[in-house]
């Protein structure tokens, strides 16, 4: 019999009843160190006092008003994002997937308004993940996501990851946009080198194609800058943001330049809940905290510490791990075993990690993780790795 909850997830037999900082408490009272943060969502950990205060204050005052009216909380968050990024304008959504939908619509409308309707091809990359809507799966194009869901939305050309020659050959006067994650998350914590991002920006400038950066997972302070592309010293035309910006409250945002957004006039897009007062109030508190240069410097310092210890872990268990990947606190361990084995061993050691493609184990701790918690994380990851390693040697005996 089908469960009452549609069984689209492979869920672990674990349920949590409470969260505090970097820790989650399960139904049986066991505490787990959370190195997944709801997959880069709980950027400030669980139940951060400033977020709880903002949410409860807003909840007591006003939950929802229609976008038929001005929403001051939305305007405040948009002003903050415009002040702190390349963007001139922002549209709020409830998820990352919805940001992909708007980014695609924005590009199409931009070229339509320019009187170049045939210019509709968006270049995307193998291993990408932009969400699960029909548009987002067509954009990513992976067999696993699209199988059985055709016919797919046309207009995407999928290129190999990390092959700049293929990219240079593909981009041209018919390219409407390039859509790429500065660091692939689901794809296995694969970092786009700064030089490649700069070359992609230059090729977009040369051909007029718009550059869409998907910073849903790698943005909001995770790399030690507010947004990952800042390391390369270039800016996109359109950026997709979600996950961390709500700190656990469903919130996403499409940030754009005035030129890129020029086709999106009244009536061209909308959302009932997108930009609701609760989400935007929380988002403004998150952005205020995360964009503080001292906070970002701390992310960088802790990331250095964590990475150094992970390098030592890889050296200790060469049968289990191959290499450390990533940037800032968006870290990956390329594995020689199935990453799911390590995730499962982590449950035994009471540490939560996340598997990704390309045989990679993801570590996306709250940005507020302390030095002591990093030390504790290493003890627990060591325990998990030791148990997987023992399993390997017992099967080879
Ligand atoms: C890079 C990226 N884009 C888009 C999405 C989709 O976001 P959501 O699950 O909030 O719809 C995700 C989610 O994992 C993501 O990692």
Image (cartoon, rainbow, N blue to C red):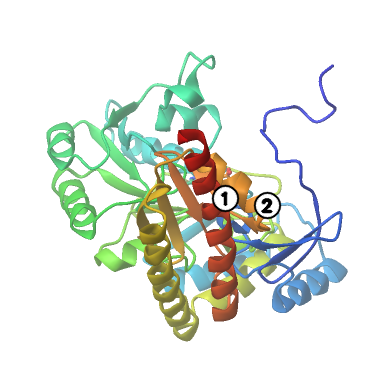
Give the side of residue 396 with respect to residue 169, left or right.
right
Position in image of residue 119 (x %, y %): 27, 30
Q: State the residue position of label 1.
A: 387
Point 40% across, 27% down: residue: 141
Distance from label 2 to label 1 (Cα)?
A: 9 Å
Kindly indicate the quadrant of the structure image that contains residue 396.
top left
Q: Tell me the SS state at disc 1.
A: helix
Q: Is residue 258 visible in this depiction of the protein?
A: no
Q: 198 or 329: which is nearer to us?
A: 329
Q: 17 or 310: which is nearer to us?
A: 310
Q: How crowded is mark 1: few (under 14 residues within 10 Å), some or many (20 or more)?
A: some
Position in image of residue 213 (x %, y %): 37, 51
Q: Residue 34 carries which label?
A: none
Looking at the image, the residue that sits furthest to the bottom is 294
Point 56% across, 41% down: residue: 341
Q: Residues within 10 Å of mark 2 (few under 14, many from 20)?
A: some
Foreground tag (2 vs 1): 1
Position in image of residue 300 (x %, y %): 41, 76
Q: 316 or 378: which is nearer to us?
A: 316
Q: In which quarter of the image is the N terminus?
A: top right
Q: Tell me the SS state at disc 2.
A: helix
Kindly indicate the quadrant of the structure image that contains residue 198.
bottom left
Query: Do tag 2 and tag 1 residues touch (Cβ < 8 Å)?
Result: yes
Q: State the residue position of label 2.
A: 348
Dot 2 or dot 1: first in sequence order is 2
Position in image of residue 324 (x %, y %): 36, 57
Q: Is residue 60 visible in this depiction of the protein?
A: yes
Q: For the image shown, how many numbered marks are present on the structure? A: 2
Q: 234 or 14: which is nearer to us?
A: 14
Task: For ligand 1, tell me if the residue under mark 1 lies within 8 Å.
Answer: no
């Amino acid at each position: 019999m089908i469960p009452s909850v549609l069984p689209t997830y492979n869920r672990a037999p674990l349920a949590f009843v409470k969260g505090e900082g970097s820790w989650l408490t399960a139904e049986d009272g066991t505490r787990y160190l959370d190195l997944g943060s709801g997959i880069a969502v709980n950027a400030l950990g669980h139940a951060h006092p400033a977020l709880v205060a903002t949410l409860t204050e807003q909840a007591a005052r006003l939950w929802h008003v229609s976008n038929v009216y001005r929403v001051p909380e939305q305007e405040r968050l948009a002003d903050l994002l415009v002040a702190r990024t390349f963007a001139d304008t922002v549209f709020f959504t409830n998820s990352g997937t919805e940001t992909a939908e708007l980014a695609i619509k924005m590009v199409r409308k931009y070229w339509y308004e320019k009187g170049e309707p045939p210019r509709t091809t968006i270049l995307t990359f193998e291993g990408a993940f932009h969400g699960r809507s029909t548009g987002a799966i067509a954009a990513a194009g992976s067999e696993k996501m699209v199988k059985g869901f055709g016919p797919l939305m046309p207009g995407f050309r999928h290129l190999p990851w990390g092959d700049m020659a293929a990219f240079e050959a593909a981009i041209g006067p018919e390219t409407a946009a390039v859509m790429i994650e500065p660091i692939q998350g689901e794809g296995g914590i694969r970092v786009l080198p700064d030089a490649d991002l700069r070359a992609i920006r230059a090729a977009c400038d040369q051909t007029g194609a718009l550059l869409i950066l998907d910073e849903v997972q790698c943005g909001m302070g995770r790399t030690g800058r507010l947004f990952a592309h800042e390391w390369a010293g270039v800016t996109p035309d359109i950026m997709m943001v979600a996950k961390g910006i709500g700190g656990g409250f469903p919130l996403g945002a499409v940030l754009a330049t005035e030129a890129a957004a020029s086709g999106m006039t009244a009536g061209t897009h909308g959302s009932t809940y997108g930009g609701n007062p609760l989400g935007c109030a929380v988002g403004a508190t998150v952005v205020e905290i995360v964009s503080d240069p001292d906070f970002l410097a701390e992310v960088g310092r802790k990331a250095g510490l964590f990475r150094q210890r992970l390098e030592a872990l890889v050296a200790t268990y060469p049968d289990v791990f191959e290499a450390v990947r990533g940037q800032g606190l968006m870290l990956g361990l390329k594995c020689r075993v199935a990453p799911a084995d390590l995730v499962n061993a982590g449950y035994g050691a009471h540490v939560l990690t996340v598997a990704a493609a390309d045989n990679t184990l993801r570590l996306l701790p709250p940005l507020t993780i302390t030095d002591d918690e990093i030390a504790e994380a290493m003890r627990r990851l060591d325990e998990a790795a030791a148990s997987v390693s023992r399993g390997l040697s017992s099967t080879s005996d």
